Amino acid sequence: MRLDPVTLEIVGNRLSALTEEMCLTLQRTSRSLYVKETADFCCAFAGLDGGFVAYPRGIGVSGFVGLNVLTAVRAAGPLEPGDVIITNDPYRSGGLATHLTDIQLIEPYFHDGELIGYGWAFIHCSDIGGRVPSSLSPINDEIFQEGLQIPPVKLVRAGQPARDVEALISANSRTPEANLGDIRAMLASLRTGRERLSGVIAQHGVDTVLAAQGDLVDYTAGKARAALASLGDGTYRFVDYLDDDAVSSIPVRLSVTATLRAGDLHLDFTGTDPQVAAAFNIATLGRPHAWITTRVLALICTLDPGIALNAGLIAPISVTTPEGSLVNPLHPAAVGVRHASANRVNDAVGGALGLAAPQVLPAASSGLVVPVVVAEQRGTGQNVQVLEPMVGGTGARDGSDGVDGRDSGISNLSNNPVETVETEIGVEILRYGLRADSGGAGRWRGGCGLELTFRVLGEGSKLLARGLERMCFRPWGVRGGGPGAPTELIVNPGTPRERRHFKIDVLPLEPGDVVTLLTSGAGGYGAAYTRDPQAVLRDVQRGVVTREAAARDYGVILRDAPDAAPAVDVEATAAARREHPEVAAAGPERQAWESVFDTDTVDRLVAALFRLPRPARGPRRAAVYTAVLGELPDGFPRTRPSAEQVGTARRTLDDEISALEKVMA
């Protein structure tokens, strides 16, 4: 360390405050609903190595602290004062952009002609072109369908706006005015950062600021290693699933093996399925990317709440991500709905580390982020808006229930005010609240999911809801805790025109249609029949657990007291709790799936697939699963198979894998 601790603390706090002020500038001057209300944006200060030296703690997207701007900077060519780089290309930016609707700006900061770091800002724009309104759809199979790809180029050259670049971006968007307004807000935030950094230099000197870049990151890296070292050494594995790949009914497997050694953590994703011909791939480029390390950063910050947010958090983390897999796809794989897979990575990493630290890690969160988008025609243009970024709750942990209706697993987006939504888009919000009985039962209850119900008012409206997940494989509980309720999407519920949907692309809606989205609840922790009956009573009084579920899931029988308030019937509860029903912690669907597709057998399948040429992997994988699923009842795994069907399917799976292995021998 080159600086004394007092100076380092002062400069570090000054730089962190600088990033917070950048974020406030961006939010207050932005144009689109998803930026100014939902807060899907962030700003940071990067050092000369491209890693973030200072990152905001209380505003903006929390999970991108591990990103690096250097690949994009080098791709843009020589820089001078007044330049600003723009990009949204995940592959050409080195993973800085994670899908095309995330627009990145980078400004080199100079002092007396010397480069001293970079300001960074990003926003999620409403639309960047492509096949569908809002650009993102799960069934896109190439990044070319997802919108305009902007390689790292200069948006501003020596202080002069590049009007040709602005015109190109505007011509390729359904919402050009909103995009341009948000870009100008980002430019304002970068200017704020530059001005505040000049003030830090004026007070402390440029040499101190440069020295602080390395010292701050190194200090955080040391604290991060110390936090991870407290878990002890060991190797732990966990497998989880996406419901399907949106173009078939075949689930997508995510596997992670976590190895802890003296404060270092290696995440090995060997066993994860090949990249898919859909938009769920995560472009990590083989690096410890933000989308696959977010849960580790959250764990480190839990173990050491006072740790600073900067690139030092990822210093102890290394990864193995097989090339051509879901977590390291090759161009031009689609990546627009990468957040669905990132949620499942979060759950798998949390499951593996939970084996190392069961008193620290929670059960599975609801495991989804669903930006509910309505696109409508307005005059000669289109209005494309995110009504709400729908999430669920957090998993229960030892000693604490999960949080209801909020999950910052991969971001900390805000909900949109109903009044603002109804002003910006032609809908009427009928209900927005917690979903009763959705949290996994347990000694500690999983957090509840949410319900959003709205009526469509305008002609020609379309619904998009990317990120729909946990509709089949439920958020798992631990140590006897139950799973959360699955996600549901219903149009016109309770009417003759009721329709239930799974993953959707673009769903046309008529005036008067009512849409209800029920997000999944989170997993419970510990056996439900050991939960304090008074805690169950409070849940019933709050409306998050019904009386029927209190009896069914917790063995708590309530009676009406003389004042009409419910009370626990102690004798009836004691009698009910003598029976202990078996709980499938991951849900009956996963239990059924793994009765056929067990871990060791699917390891063989995935290994054999990766020995095939990359273009052949997806089709061969689909052929194997189709052959096996043909032996199972329609609707499997939601439909339980007989023991005979399971035996036949397992033999078919073994035959298919053996044939594949012989071909590759």
Image (cartoon, rainbow, N blue to C red):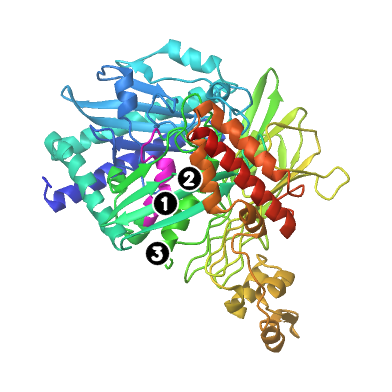
- Residue 140 pos. (x, y %): 60, 28
Is there any visible trace of residue 495 in the rendered image? Answer: yes
For disc 3, the marked residue is 357
- Please check the rendered image and state whether residue 294 is part of the magenta-colored stretch, yes or no: yes
Tell me how far mark 2 sits from mark 1, CA to CA. 9 Å
Of tags 2 and 3, the one toward the viewer is 2
With 72 as the anchor, is 479 left or right in this view?
A: right
Residue 356, located in which quarter of the rendered image? bottom left
Q: Earlier in the sequence, mark 1 or mark 3?
A: 1
Secondary element type, mark 1: strand
Tag shown at residue 271 = 2
Label 3 amino acid? Ala
Query: In terms of depth relative to the viewer, which is nearer, 604 or 63?
Result: 604
Of tags 1 and 3, the one toward the viewer is 1
Residue sitting at x 76%, y 35%: 457
Residue sitting at x 41%, y 47%: 294
Determine the main secondary structure of the stretch shown in magenta.
Answer: helix
Query: In terms of depth relative to the viewer, which is nearer, 82 or 71?
Result: 71
Tag shown at residue 45 = none
- Please check the rendered image and state whether residue 532 is part of the magenta-colored stretch, yes or no: no
With 571 as the anchor, is 1 left or right in this view?
A: left
Label 1 amino acid? Thr
Tell me how far mark 1 sits from mark 3, CA to CA. 15 Å
Tag shown at residue 257 = 1
- Residue 66 pos. (x, y %): 35, 41
- Residue 98 pos. (x, y %): 45, 33
Residue sitting at x 69%, y 73%: 550
Q: Is residue 543 above or below residue 221?
A: below
- Residue 14 pos. (x, y %): 25, 44
